[in-house]
Image: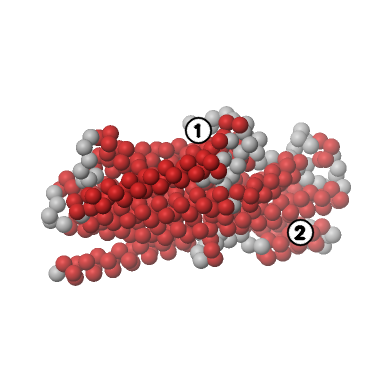
């Protein structure tokens, strides 16, 4: 369905669908030299976007101050979440501009690795990378429209006219959607690293198979590199193995660099997701036990709050799922190395394999933003357990206050 034919030539073009929306909304971390996108990457355009965000925040603050007396506690909490997301958006835009040069260096390193893998006959599937990015941006656009329409249709805030309600929903919830877009950008970058680890593993797998037949050569793709693959010598196997070893280490370092660039945003995203999910679930409970509101209002509140719980949960789970999947692909290299080491035991080649194995042990791939948490499947379990615990405590305390 999303397999649109586009021939991306580098990392930036592989991420073009999601990067385009990043540039439109002021996140200028990754640059692209094509003429059609230059203006959206200029500092002047960034100032223009910031001024628009400032105007939106001022408008929301004035509108809220004039209408706050008509809002219940659930709506006030909702606006507090919006304010926090404006703060996160400001941090995202700042770090996006601050880390531009570092992101450019990462892009050059990835291009160098891609050339090495292509030289060995295991090129990265950039079409698959582009499709990943396209799927994520389609999911993001659909979620934006669904969430905004739900809030516009079911919100109890008194605004005349359906179109005005939709416009207000888009304006108020815009920072939350842009922050989700930037989180998806991080996930896209990590997914692309996973594809490159997969290419390294494919090379090692074919290398192992050929070596088991006493042919110390990686003959991966005769059509891509015929001259290189004709060299069936021990020296050839050492050269190939060193290229793969260096590529694997470089990819590990790049993953750490990407995490370091996005670490503040990731921590703020996880904290805001925890607060939002806990608060919204409590709001669902409190609105349903409140006898002063009608059944229709209870259903409306429940749908709005549940939709944001699902949105934040999906974003949090997807971040951890992406990182865990990349770590699994990284660990697969160690398993392949171990099998290769057993078959080459007692040969000169085994020393080089041992160096690769030591390199993997000394340079583990762990996604630890700010050194505070490890993004993994385990965090999802702990996150769910913490939300459940806090939710139970808050509900018990609220029930005691009511009594």
In the image, which disc is placed on residue 198? none
The one of 341 and 317 positioned closer to us in this rendering: 317
The residues tagged by marks 2 and 1 sit, at their Cα atoms, a distance apart of 40 Å
Name the residue located 73 percent from the left edge and 59 percent from the top edge. 356
Horizontal side, residue 99 vs residue 210: left or right: left
Secondary element type, mark 1: loop
* Mark closest to the chain's N terminus, 2 or 1: 1
Structural crowding at the residue carrying mark 1, measured as other residues with C-alpha within 10 Å and reported as few (<14), some (14–19) or many (≥20): few
The one of 202 and 5 positioned closer to us in this rendering: 5
Name the residue located 51 percent from the left edge and 43 percent from the top edge. 46
Name the residue located 16 percent from the left edge and 57 percent from the top edge. 290
Horizontal side, residue 270 vs residue 32: left or right: left
Structural crowding at the residue carrying mark 2, measured as other residues with C-alpha within 10 Å and reported as few (<14), some (14–19) or many (≥20): many
The one of 308 and 210 positioned closer to us in this rendering: 308
- Residue reaching furthest to the top: 5
The one of 302 and 385 positioned closer to us in this rendering: 302
Residue 7 drawn at (x, y percent): 62, 31
Q: Which residue is mark 2?
A: 353
Q: Is residue 232 visible?
A: yes
Residue 269 drawn at (x, y percent): 44, 56
Residue 124 drawn at (x, y percent): 66, 41
Residue 77 drawn at (x, y percent): 28, 56
On screen, residue 347 above or below 53 = below
On screen, residue 54 above or below 371 = above
Q: Is residue 181 visible?
A: no
Name the residue located 58 percent from the left edge and 61 percent from the top edge. 366
- The answer to which image quadrant residue 145 occupies is top left
In the image, which disc is placed on residue 2? 1
């Amino acid at each position: 369905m999303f397999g649109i034919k586009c021939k991306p030539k580098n990392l930036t073009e592989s991420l073009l669908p999601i990067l385009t929306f990043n540039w439109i909304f002021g996140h200028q971390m990754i640059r692209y030299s094509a003429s059609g996108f230059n203006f959206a990457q200029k500092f002047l355009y960034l100032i223009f976007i910031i001024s628009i965000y400032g105007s939106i925040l001022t408008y929301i603050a004035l509108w809220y101050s004039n209408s706050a007396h008509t809002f219940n506690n659930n709506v006030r909490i909702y606006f507090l979440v919006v304010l926090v997301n404006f703060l996160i958006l400001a941090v995202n835009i700042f770090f996006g501009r601050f880390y531009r040069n570092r992101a450019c260096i990462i892009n050059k390193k990835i291009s160098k690795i891609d050339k090495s893998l292509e030289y060995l006959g295991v090129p990265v599937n950039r079409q698959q990378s582009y499709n990943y990015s396209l799927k994520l941006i389609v999911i993001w656009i659909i979620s934006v429209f669904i969430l905004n329409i739900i809030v516009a249709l079911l919100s109890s805030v008194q605004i005349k006219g359906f179109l005005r309600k939709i416009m207000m929903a888009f304006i108020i919830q815009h920072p939350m959607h842009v922050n989700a877009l930037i989180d998806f950008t991080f996930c896209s970058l990590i997914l692309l690293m996973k594809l490159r680890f997969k290419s390294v593993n494919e090379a090692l797998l074919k290398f192992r198979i050929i070596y088991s037949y006493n042919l110390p050569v990686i003959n991966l793709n005769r059509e891509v590199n015929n001259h290189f693959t004709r060299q069936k010598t021990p020296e050839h196997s050492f050269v190939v193995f060193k290229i793969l070893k260096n590529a694997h280490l470089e990819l590990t370092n790049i993953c750490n660099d990407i995490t370091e660039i996005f670490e503040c945003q990731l921590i703020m995203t996880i904290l805001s997701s925890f607060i939002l999910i806990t608060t919204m679930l409590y709001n669902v409970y409190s609105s349903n036990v409140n006898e002063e509101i009608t059944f229709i209002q209870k259903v409306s509140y429940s749908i709005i709050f549940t939709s944001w719980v699902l949105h934040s949960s999906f974003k949090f789970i997807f971040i951890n799922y992406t990182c865990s999947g990349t770590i699994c692909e990284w660990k697969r290299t160690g398993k392949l190395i171990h099998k290769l080491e057993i078959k080459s035991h007692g040969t000169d080649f085994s020393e080089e394999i041992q160096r690769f194995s030591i390199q993997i042990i000394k340079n583990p791939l762990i996604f630890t933003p700010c050194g505070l948490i490890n993004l993994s499947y385990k965090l999802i379990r702990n996150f769910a357990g913490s939300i459940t615990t806090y939710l139970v405590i808050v509900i018990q305390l609220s029930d005691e206050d009511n009594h």
